[in-house]
Image (cartoon, rainbow, N blue to C red):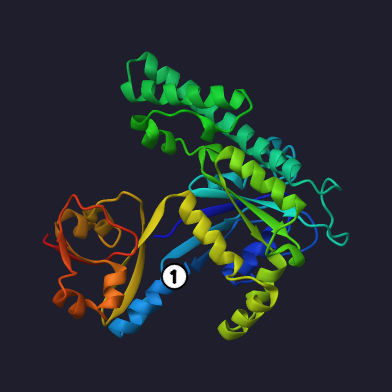
Amino acid sequence: MGFKCGIVGLPNVGKSTLFNALTQTASAQAANYPFCTIEPNVGDVAVPEPRLDKLAAIANSKEILPARMNFVDIAGLVEGASKGEGLGNQFLANIRETDAIAYVLRCFDDDDVTHVSNTIDPMSDLEVVETELMLADLESLEKRKANNEKKARSGDKEAKAALALIDLALEQLNNGKPARFADVPQDDRKAWRELQLLTSKPVLFIANVDEDSASDGNDYSKRVFERAEQEKAQAVVISAKIESELALLENEEREEYLDAIGLEEPGLSRLIHTGYSLLDLKTYFTVGPKEARAWTIKDGWTAPRAAGVIHGDFEKGFIRAETIAYDDFIACNGEAGAKEAGKMRAEGKDYIVKDGDVLHFRFNV
C-alpha cells in the first residue's frame, strides 16, 4: 500500500531534481527552464524500513518486500495556471487521487538558477501555488453544484448531502482559505474526501535548501516551518542537490557521505517518515521463509481490515490474527521462540493492529 504523494511547486524550485533523486531515475527531465516537466511523472520507491531487514534475517526469508510510496511530479505551476497561463491546469487532475500534496518551496540562493519572479521568497511561492489549487477547486465545485441542485430539487437525498458539502467547501474557498480548514462533521468525512478537492488534502512542505543548510536549515526554511506549525501541517528540510548525489552512490558510500555532511539519514527517509506521521500511517509485517513483507495501514485499523490489504478474501473470511510484537519477535529469535515464550497472541476481529506487529492471518472463504 504505502501512500501516494503529489509534488507541486513553481518552476525552477528543484521539484523535478528532487523527484529524480527520490525515485533514483532520470525519467523527469530536470533543466534550468520553466515547464521542463511537460507530462506528469510517476515514480515508485521503497519505504525505508530497517525492522524488515532484521525480521528477514531471523526468518531466513528468501525475499524482502518493503512497502511502496508513489510520487507524482506535476509540471511547475505559475500564477494564472487555473485560467490557462503557462501550461494551464491540465496537470492538476493527476493529483486529485493522491493521499497528500507536497509543496516544494525554494529555500536557496543561486544566481545560475532563474526564479520565475526573480526573487527568493518561499512564502510568496506557496501563496501562488495554493491560490491556483483553490481556483481549480472553485471551478470544479461550481460545475458540480448546478448538477446537484437540479437533483436535490427532485428529492435526491444523496444530491442534497453532496450539495451541503459543496456549499461548505465554497464558503471556505470564497473566504480565501483552503478546503482543508473546513470543519467537516465526522459522519461526512468519507463523502468529503470523495469530492477530491486539491486543497482538502493534507499538506507537507518541503524546504529545498542549499547543501550547506541540509542539516540545520536556513532563514528561508525557518519561515516554512513556522507556517507549517501555524497550519498544523508537516515540514521537512531537504537538499535536492544532495539527494541527487546520494542517488548515484552504493549503500556503503552513501553512509560515508551522510556521515561526512552530518546527516543521519537521506532526505527520502525523512520525507517518508514525515508523510507517515501526517497521514497517521502504521506498518505491520508478515514474515516467513518465502518472504518478509511490510504492509501500510491507517492508525486504528482492525485486524480484518489490515488483512484486507493483502487480499479481500483475508478480510472476508477472517478468523483470527496470530500476533507477535516486533520487539518480542526479535528478542525470542523468531516465531518459534516467541510461541514457546508465550509471546504469540490470538487476536480477534476487534483487535486494533499496532505498529510493528508481526501477523499471520487465519481465514476461511
Q: Residue at left 65%, top 48%? A: 225
User: In this picture, is 320 found above or below 139?
Assistant: below
Q: Where in the figure is residue 129, as x and y percent of width and height?
A: 68, 42
Foreground pick, 128 / 226? 226
Question: Is residue 343 left or right of 294 when viewed as pictured?
Answer: left
Question: Is residue 352 left or right of 76 when viewed as pictured?
Answer: left
User: In this picture, is 191 found above or below 298?
Assistant: above
Q: Where in the figure is residue 49, as x and y percent of width and height?
A: 44, 70
Check disc 1 and report its element: helix, strand or loop. loop
Q: Name the quadrant of the C terminus.
A: bottom left
Q: Name the quadrant of the N terminus.
A: bottom left
Residue 78 visible to an observer of this rendering: no
Residue 70 visible to an observer of this rendering: yes
Residue marked by disc 1: 49
Foreground pick, 323 / 117? 323
Q: Residue at left 42%, top 33%? A: 192
Name the quadrant containing residue 55.
Answer: bottom left
Q: Amino acid at mark 1?
A: Glu
Foreground pick, 63 / 303? 303
Mark 1 surroundings within 10 Å by alpha-carbon count, few (fewer than 14), some (14 through 19), many (20 or more)? some
> Residue placed farthest to the top in the image?
153
